[in-house]
């Protein structure tokens, strides 16, 4: 018997999403609350590793000062797994940010989910960040009205 399919929920409006792109770079001193050594293959865990970043996007709603903290698990293979939160602020409003990423040998890769606050209330955004030049990250994404769709509560069974 297949699981019961939940009723669809409409979480968006008819407005068109806006594509964005730009760059970011660190401008503030790093800080961290704690580092706990681990057992191989985990080298250690860093908590509340934070920095300040300047973001310049072709859509000014996503440009501004970004303050963030993240937790990091660093492995012997030089790969790190990261999760964090932050706030992006500019004259028009602010964004609450949650991000997840990893560090392969080529540099930090992140995906960030943003929720508008103040002047950006009712908007959401999603950004992907990849290294581009020393100390800079290329960013691209989308701003859209409403909230990110919830993932499905169930998985389709395989076709028979």
Image: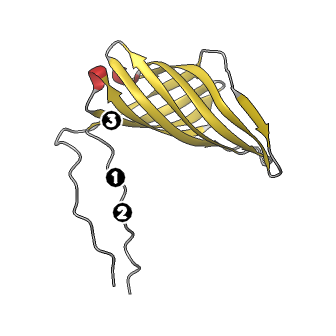
Q: Residue at x 35, y 12 (%)?
A: 91
The residue at 22%/55% (across/down) is 9
Between label 3 and label 2, give the one nearer the viewer. 2
Q: Quadrant of residue 78?
A: top right
3 or 2: tag closer to the N-terminus: 3
- Looking at the picture, tell me which residue is in the foreground, 129 or 123: 123
| SS for dot 1 | loop
Q: Is residue 142 visible?
A: no
Q: Image point 58% across, 28% down: which residue?
A: 69
Residue 52 screen position, x and y as percent = 57, 19
Q: CA distance from mark 2 to mark 1?
A: 8 Å
Furthest residue to the left? Answer: 14
- Residue ranking furthest to the bottom: 160
Residue that label 2 marks = 153
**Secondary structure under the numbered disc 2 in the rendered image:** loop
Q: Which residue is the site of mark 3?
A: 124
Query: x and y percent of residue 43 in the render?
Result: 80, 44
CB under 8 Å between callouts 2 and 1? yes
Residue 117 can be seen in this image: yes
């Amino acid at each position: 018997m297949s699981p019961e399919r939940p009723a669809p929920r409409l979480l968006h409006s008819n407005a068109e999403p806006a594509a964005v792109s730009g760059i970011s770079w660190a401008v503030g001193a790093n800080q961290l609350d704690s580092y706990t050594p681990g057992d191989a293959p985990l080298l250690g865990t860093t908590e509340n590793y934070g920095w300040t970043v300047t973001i310049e996007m072709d859509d000014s709603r996503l440009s501004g000062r970004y303050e963030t903290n993240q937790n990091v698990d660093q492995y012997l293979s030089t790969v790190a797994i990261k999760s964090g939160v932050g706030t992006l602020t500019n004259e028009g409003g602010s964004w609450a940010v949650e991000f997840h990423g990893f560090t392969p040998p080529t540099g930090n890769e992140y995906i960030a989910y943003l929720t508008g606050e103040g002047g950006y209330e009712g908007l959401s955004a999603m950004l992907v960040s990849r290294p581009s030049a020393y100390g800079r990250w290329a960013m691209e994404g989308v701003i859209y009205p409403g909230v990110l769709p919830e993932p499905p509560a169930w998985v389709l069974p395989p076709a028979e």
